[in-house]
Amino acid sequence: MEASILFFRACLALLALPIYLLSFLGIWQPFCKKIFFPFFIEHFSATHEKKAKKQKQELFRNLPDFRSPSGELKLLEIGTGCGANFQYYPPGCKVTCTDINPNFQQGLSRSMNKNQHVHYERFLVAAGEDLHQVPSGSVDVVVCTLVLCSVHDMNGTLKEALRVLRPGGAFYFLEHVVADRSSWKYFWQQICYPTWKLVFDGCCLTREIWKNLEQANFSELNLQHLSIALPWTPIQPHIVGYAVNAARGGSQEEAAGECKTAQQAGKKMY
Ligand SMILES: C[S@@+](CC[C@H](N)C(=O)[O-])C[C@H]1O[C@@H](n2cnc3c(N)ncnc32)[C@H](O)[C@@H]1O
Ligand SMILES: *[C@@H]1O[C@H](CO)[C@@H](O)[C@H](O)[C@H]1NC(C)=O
Ligand SMILES: *[C@@H]1O[C@H](CO)[C@@H](O)[C@H](O)[C@H]1NC(C)=O
């Protein structure tokens, strides 16, 4: 690795030394998950929201196309955080929220109160890699924004998204990704990488998320690269789009059967 990157990484680590020390003492991670990150996400969401509003409106415009034949739209969100996407969901949409971190209640309730056009069905504390509480083929849409940068297993998460989607259902995403390797942005990402990951709860700056999406067995992938204006941050390059789960003839009956089981199982709330 280039010596200059190592040098600047060390400088940044020096600036963040108190956090490294807290981390060494085992204090940072719990503090980050319980207090810092939920606080940060609620405020960062507001900024990101302003910059990405147009793209998100554009992205979610065709959500109603994926209603099930009964007219319902069952949507599952992976890594809901404070619910920054609720405002884009169509009225009556039935939302299942999932997140690995249960400490977002405050921001989440605020967002739910603001967005009463949506029907909130379940809240699951679950990792995207393991959505076993959700039956196969039981949702029309899965949404995942700014989450794939942090999951431990991206392939596993995409596999779970495909599993819970009904045939013909869609996976919507908006994610920050690695910059062009010949750019200064990439250099900056390389420098920030380790400290950023520590401070922001495991967020990796240099993932080529589009590659995993391309190989994830969706039947159709609509993907666009774009830059979101977040000056001085290493998270400007983004990908946005949606991917469709192939319509398989045979498994539809099976999926319908599993749906009933889900309703019988009742609601698990946190
Ligand atoms: C940067 S926030 C984005 C929140 C929200 N989706 C948004 O767009 O504002 C990342 C979220 O992903 C969650 N997360 C991280 N790893 C996860 C995993 N393996 N499974 C599910 N959620 C995860 C975090 O707890 C956090 O809520
Ligand atoms: C993810 O899946 C792709 C395609 O199957 C594979 O090439 C890649 O190595 C996998 N990544 C990891 C980290 O397992
Ligand atoms: C895609 O499907 C094939 C065949 O079912 C499977 O072997 C492969 O592991 C799947 N790829 C991913 C990334 O899940």
Image: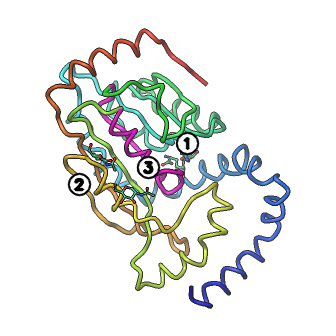
- Image quarter in which the N terminus is found: bottom right
- Which percent across, then down, holds residue 24? 82, 60
| Image position of 209 with respect to 98: above or below | below
Segment tinted magenta in the rendering: 138-163
Identify which residue is drawn at 23% across, 54% down: 222
* Label 3 lies in ligand 1 vicinity (Cβ under 8 Å): yes
Q: Is 146 contained in the magenta span? A: yes
| Image position of 164 with respect to 188: above or below | above
Q: CA distance from mark 1 to mark 3?
A: 10 Å
Callout 3 environment at 10 Å: few (<14), some (14 to 19), or many (20+)? many
Q: Which residue is mark 2?
A: 222
In the picture provided, is 163 more to the left or to the right than 150? left
**Residue nearest the observer in this picture, 234 or 46:** 234
Identify which residue is drawn at 72% across, 51% down: 32
- Please state which amino acid type lies under the numbered disc 1: Gly
- Which percent across, then down, holds residue 67? 23, 29
Q: Which residue is mark 1?
A: 81
Q: Which residue is mark 3?
A: 145
Identify which residue is drawn at 49% across, 23% down: 122
- Local secondary structure at mark 3: strand
Q: Is 24 contained in the magenta span? A: no
**Residue nearest the observer in this picture, 242 or 106:** 242
